[in-house]
Image (tube, rainbow, N blue to C red):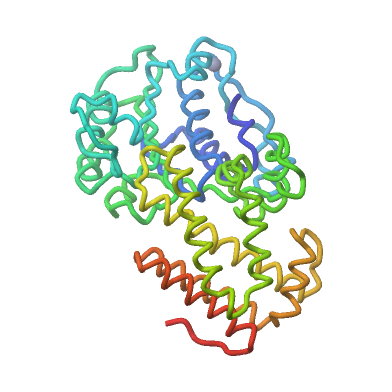
């Protein structure tokens, strides 16, 4: 794999390429943008290029990019030399991937799993090794994943290294929450922005992972072009749960309201437990909230589909008969009110409000909206 294999991130690649051509490769960068769109992949390929023994140029991927037509070629790693091979196996001594899991290998032993990247981990795995010469002579690259999880002390400790990195040392901070960095971190780094991916491309990738075509289209749209999260959903068994939930929304009435709210809470709890198994660094509270948020996303996406159908966009509907049924109950104004109520519920989940209260109120809001009563969410 090489940089040109990182598809549909040509704005980010163009920015890196222009810096390289000007002989001003930034030593400190922040790769930011939505989750699961290729930031880490590009960072790894960029690190490979910095360490490659025989860098080459390849044709600029014009087919993916109508905007950067001035670029005919892009510098890229050769993908053949021993440095490239070492990088691919994760064994290159000058490419350092640092994340919360690194804490498990830190000198300071820990019994609990980490929510933040603490200062001793940043010192041990970034600041101290950054002062050493590259082992293989070309460059030393540090990639800090989920870099927004560096706590304040870690961020402050890293400032000097970001400002004056040793020669041939490059630091890339990766995040989908760039606002969580201290302003002093942001001002010392070049920001490279990543975009969401085209839905069709995401759907195609999901199909390559054995996801049926209609589900692939649904998850691509649901995740708004974020391949990583879409792949995780496509590979789970949650599509059936999603279908069940949409069916419950079509049948929602006063007698079923409380049962539906309880079903969401119970199902979210189970889903949260499953998420915890695949993500041992998370807490039960976090995965439960992620699972609850999933139902809100499904609801919002369902009411967006209702709106699309009202405006004559009948293509790409998942469970089209049920959406049709909801379109009869929810006018465009009612669907918009339901989407607003869903967004309000998400804010309550973020604020740790009691789940029963949130989902019972939300189901009531949906019924009100369908009945033409539009409460303004406070
Ligand atoms: Zn190479």
Q: Is residue 174 above or below residue 82?
A: below
Please report the residue visible at 68 percent of the width from the left and 40 percent of the height from the top: 206
Q: Does residue 208 appear to the left or right of 88 in the view shown?
A: right
Quarter of the picture containing the C terminus is bottom left
Q: Residue furthest top?
A: 82
Q: Position of residue 250 (x, y in %)?
A: 68, 71
Q: Is residue 321 above or below residue 333?
A: above
Kindly tell me whether residue 9 is visible in this rendering. no
Q: Quadrant of residue 71?
A: top right
Q: Residue furthest bottom?
A: 373
Q: Is residue 167 above or below residue 155?
A: above
Q: Does residue 94 appear to the left or right of 5 in the view shown?
A: left
Q: Position of residue 118 (x, y in %)?
A: 23, 39
Q: Position of residue 9 (x, y in %)?
A: 60, 43
Please report the residue visible at 59 percent of the width from the left and 46 percent of the height from the top: 233
Q: Position of residue 94 (x, y in %)?
A: 38, 19
Please report the residue visible at 75 percent of the width from the left and 43 percent of the height from the top: 212
Please report the residue visible at 64 percent of the width from the left and 87 percent of the height from the top: 371
Q: Quadrant of residue 123?
A: top left
Query: Depth check: 187 or 38 in front?
Result: 38
Ligand 1 sits in quadrant: top right
Quarter of the picture containing the N terminus is top right
């Amino acid at each position: 794999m090489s940089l040109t294999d990182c598809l549909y991130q040509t704005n980010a690649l163009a920015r890196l390429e222009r810096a390289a051509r000007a002989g001003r490769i930034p030593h400190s960068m922040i790769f930011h943008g939505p989750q699961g769109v290729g930031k880490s992949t590009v960072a790894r390929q960029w690190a490979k290029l910095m360490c490659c023994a025989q860098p080459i140029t390849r044709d600029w991927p014009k087919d993916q990019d109508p905007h950067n037509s001035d670029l005919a070629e892009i510098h890229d790693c050769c993908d053949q030399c021993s440095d490239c091979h070492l990088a691919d196996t994760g064994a290159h001594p000058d490419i350092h991937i640092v994340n919360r899991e690194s804490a498990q290998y830190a000198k300071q032993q820990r019994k609990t799993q980490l929510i933040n990247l603490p200062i001793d981990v940043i010192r041990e795995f970034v600041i101290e090794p950054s002062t050493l010469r590259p082992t293989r002579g070309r460059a030393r690259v540090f990639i800090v994943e989920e870099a927004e999880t560096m706590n304040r002390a870690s961020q402050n400790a890293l400032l000097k290294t970001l400002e004056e990195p040793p020669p041939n040392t490059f630091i890339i901070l990766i995040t989908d929450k760039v606002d969580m960095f201290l302003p002093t971190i942001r001002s010392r780094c070049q920001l490279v922005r990543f975009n969401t991916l085209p839905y069709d491309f995401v759907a195609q990738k999901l199909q390559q992972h054995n996801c049926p075509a209609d589900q692939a289209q649904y998850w691509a749209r649901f995740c708004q072009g974020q391949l990583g999260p879409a792949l995780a959903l496509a590979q789970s068994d949650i599509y059936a749960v999603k279908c069940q939930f949409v069916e419950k929304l079509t049948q929602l009435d006063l007698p079923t309201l409380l049962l539906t709210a309880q079903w969401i809470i119970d199902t979210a709890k189970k889903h949260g437990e499953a998420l915890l198994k695949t993500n041992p660094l998370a807490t039960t509270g976090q995965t439960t909230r992620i699972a609850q948020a999933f139902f809100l996303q499904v609801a919002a996406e369902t009411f967006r589909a209702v709106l699309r159908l009202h405006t004559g966009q009948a293509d790409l509907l998942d469970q089209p008969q049920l959406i049709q049924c909801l379109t009869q109950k929810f006018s465009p104004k009612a669907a918009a009110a339901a989407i607003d109520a869903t967004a309000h519920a998400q804010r309550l989940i973020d604020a740790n409000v009691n789940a029963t209260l949130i989902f019972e109120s939300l189901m009531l809001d949906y019924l009100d909206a369908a009945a033409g009563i539009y409460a303004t969410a406070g």
